[in-house]
Image (cartoon, rainbow, N blue to C red):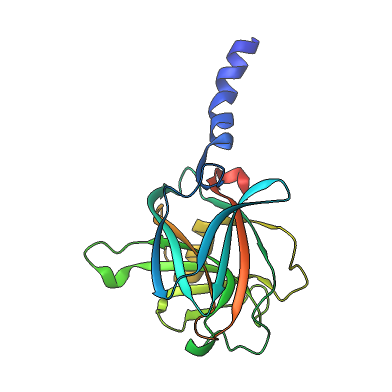
Amino acid sequence: MRPAAALLILLPVLVLALEEHVFGDFADGMDRWSERSFVGRTQYRMTEVDGRAALEAHARTSASALYRDERVDLRRTPCLQFDWRIERTLGDDLDERSKSGDDYAARIYVVRRGGLAFWRTRALNYVWSGSEPVGARWPNAYAGRNAQMWVLDSGNDLAGQWVSHARDVRADWLESFGEEIDSLDGLALMTDADDSGGEVRAWYADIRFTGPGGC
């Protein structure tokens, strides 16, 4: 087979592997993000950590989220990749399954809207927990079954260092909601400490969706 012909065969595979949907490398700032306050305001600012652009989040008895309403085609880019880092958790004495303990040093939501049927809006919430083990899942204390919590990191053993994750969102969504989906409508992140009255700090970097080979 001639090299040119071989390249034409491989090209679609290479394009698929390299395709990505960037939500936040934060090198260009926060212009495309909006904020929603629930209790006070978590302070979000651009910074640099270990020579890389990052978003710092500092919550002191506050809860506000940054979000981007943007469609994600999960057929092309199903893998959510991101790095996060925390100063410390809020401790292992919080009951994170209750409203009084629904606080996290770091969390990232992926959201699918319900359209006019607003009650069908759902969110999968990846969290760094202070008290629940890695892999634990449960309905959110405020939103119930429409917002499922999923622990990716737990405790303080990895505090102070970057931790990388790659998740197959379609597979996680199916496991969480029993529903197969092909798209998302947005992504949000939040560092909050309003329910516990505490204080936490976290950093987020390189948030993106990639092709099937990314996870």
- From the image, which quarter does the N terminus lie in? top right
- Name of the residue lying farthest toward the right: 157
Q: Is residue 213 visible?
A: yes
Compared across the picture, whether 81 is left or right of 113 comes to right
Compared across the picture, whether 186 is left or right of 2 comes to left
Q: Position of residue 190 (x, y in %)?
A: 51, 67
Compared across the picture, whether 166 is left or right of 98 comes to right
- Taking the spot 33% from the left edge, 62% from the top edge, the residue there is 113
119 is higher (above) or lower (below) than 111: below
The number of discs equals 0
- Taking the spot 51% from the left edge, 65% from the top edge, the residue there is 43
Compared across the picture, whether 143 is left or right of 23 comes to left
123 vs 162, nearest the viewer = 162
Q: Is residue 178 visible?
A: no
- Taking the spot 55% from the left edge, 72% from the top edge, the residue there is 59
87 is higher (above) or lower (below) than 196: above
Q: Position of residue 111 (x, y in %)?
A: 41, 62
Q: Position of residue 189 (x, y in %)?
A: 50, 63
- Taking the spot 73% from the left edge, 68% from the top edge, the residue there is 159
Q: Position of residue 170 (x, y in %)?
A: 49, 57
Figure quadrant of residue 38: bottom left
